[in-house]
Image: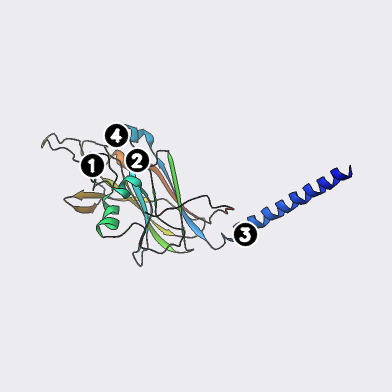
């Protein structure tokens, strides 16, 4: 009986020490979030419209931040195909995301090279998200101002204004692009608990190695609803005992 009591006391001591250690680690994790803010971007993709396109594949898109004063740019996320130029059977698709490519490629910048958003903010390049919901976060200084840009293009979303083959000229859409890429914009002040809904800003068009940023034309139909919800919120980072995210730079 005495032996059992000693064992129980040891177990209780170990359990108590473990609880205290966890409480200390949790307090440290919470303390590390004080005075920090992150921008969270939530996007919902309209899978019904995606499936109606010729290829039924999710859209290519990029998200980046622009400092409105210095004009420094920082890519937060870009789909892998665009970032790496990894196109099946094609050397290049310049009109996939013309504006992002113009800013980060043609001008000789490496995605994520410029800007000063902190060491934790490196470019994330990933496979084209196929799930309905997509979420990504980026940490920024508290009360800082940013322009958040989102460029999206769904291949093969043809319509009367952007047909696969023009019935008059018999000219084929070389890149099977359909409707042009769309640009969304939100002006953000990184104050905790603030929310923003980016508005449709323009369409980006590639033609003869030149990128044109134009008002959204009447010929844009289904493309406007591929991202049927875009929500941006500013929050304090969640406390983490272990950093389970591996962020890689491209």
Of tags 1 and 2, the one toward the viewer is: 1
Q: Mark 4 or 1 closer to N-term?
A: 4
In terms of image quadrants, where is residue 176?
A: top left
Of tags 2 and 3, the one toward the viewer is: 3
Of tags 1 and 3, the one toward the viewer is: 1
Residue located beneath label 2 in the image: 225
| Picture residue at 54% right of the left edge, 52% below the top | 243
Q: Mark 2 or 4 closer to N-term?
A: 4
Q: CA distance from mark 4 to mark 3?
A: 49 Å
- For the residues bearing labels 2 and 3, Cβ distance under 8 angstroms: no
Q: CA distance from mark 2 to mark 4?
A: 17 Å
Residue located beneath label 3 in the image: 28
Relative depth, front residue between 114 and 172: 114
Left or right position of 149 against 159: right
Q: Secondary structure at mark 1?
A: loop
Residue located beneath label 4 in the image: 55
Residue located beneath label 1 in the image: 90
> Which residue ends up furthest to the bottom in the rendered image?
70
| Picture residue at 38% right of the left edge, 35% below the top | 47
Q: Mark 2 or 3 closer to N-term?
A: 3
Q: Secondary structure at mark 2?
A: helix
Query: Residue 104's mark?
Result: none
Q: Residues within 10 Å of mark 4 (few under 14, many from 20)?
A: few
| Up/down of 223 relative to 215, above or below | above
Q: Quadrant of the N terminus?
A: top right
Of tags 4 and 3, the one toward the viewer is: 3
Colour mode of the rendering:
rainbow
| Picture residue at 40% right of the left edge, 60% below the top | 146
Of tags 2 and 4, the one toward the viewer is: 4
Q: Mark 1 or 3 closer to N-term?
A: 3
């Amino acid at each position: 009986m005495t032996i059992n009591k000693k064992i129980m006391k040891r177990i209780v001591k170990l359990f108590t020490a473990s609880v205290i250690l966890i409480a200390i680690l949790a307090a440290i994790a919470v303390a590390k979030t004080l005075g920090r803010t992150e921008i969270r971007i939530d996007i919902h993709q309209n899978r019904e419209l995606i499936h109606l396109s010729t290829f039924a594949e999710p859209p290519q898109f990029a998200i980046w931040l622009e400092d409105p004063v210095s004009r420094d740019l920082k890519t937060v996320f870009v789909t892998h195909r665009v970032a790496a130029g990894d196109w099946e059977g094609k050397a290049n698709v310049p009109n996939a995301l013309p504006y992002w490519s113009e800013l980060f490629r043609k001008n000789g910048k490496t995605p994520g090279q410029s800007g000063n958003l902190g060491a934790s903010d490196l470019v994330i390049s990933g496979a084209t998200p196929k799930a309905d919901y997509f979420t990504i976060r980026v940490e920024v200084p508290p009360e800082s101002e940013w322009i958040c840009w989102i460029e999206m293009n769904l291949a093969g979303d043809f319509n009367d204004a952007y047909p696969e083959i023009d019935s008059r000229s018999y000219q084929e859409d070389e890149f099977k692009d359909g409707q042009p890429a769309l640009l969304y914009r939100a002006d953000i002040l990184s104050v905790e608990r603030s929310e923003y809904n980016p508005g449709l800003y323009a369409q980006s068009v590639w033609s003869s190695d030149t990128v044109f940023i134009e008002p959204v034309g009447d010929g844009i139909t289904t493309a406007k609803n591929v991202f049927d919800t875009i929500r941006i919120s500013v929050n304090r980072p969640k406390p983490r005992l272990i950093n389970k995210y591996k962020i890689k730079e491209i």
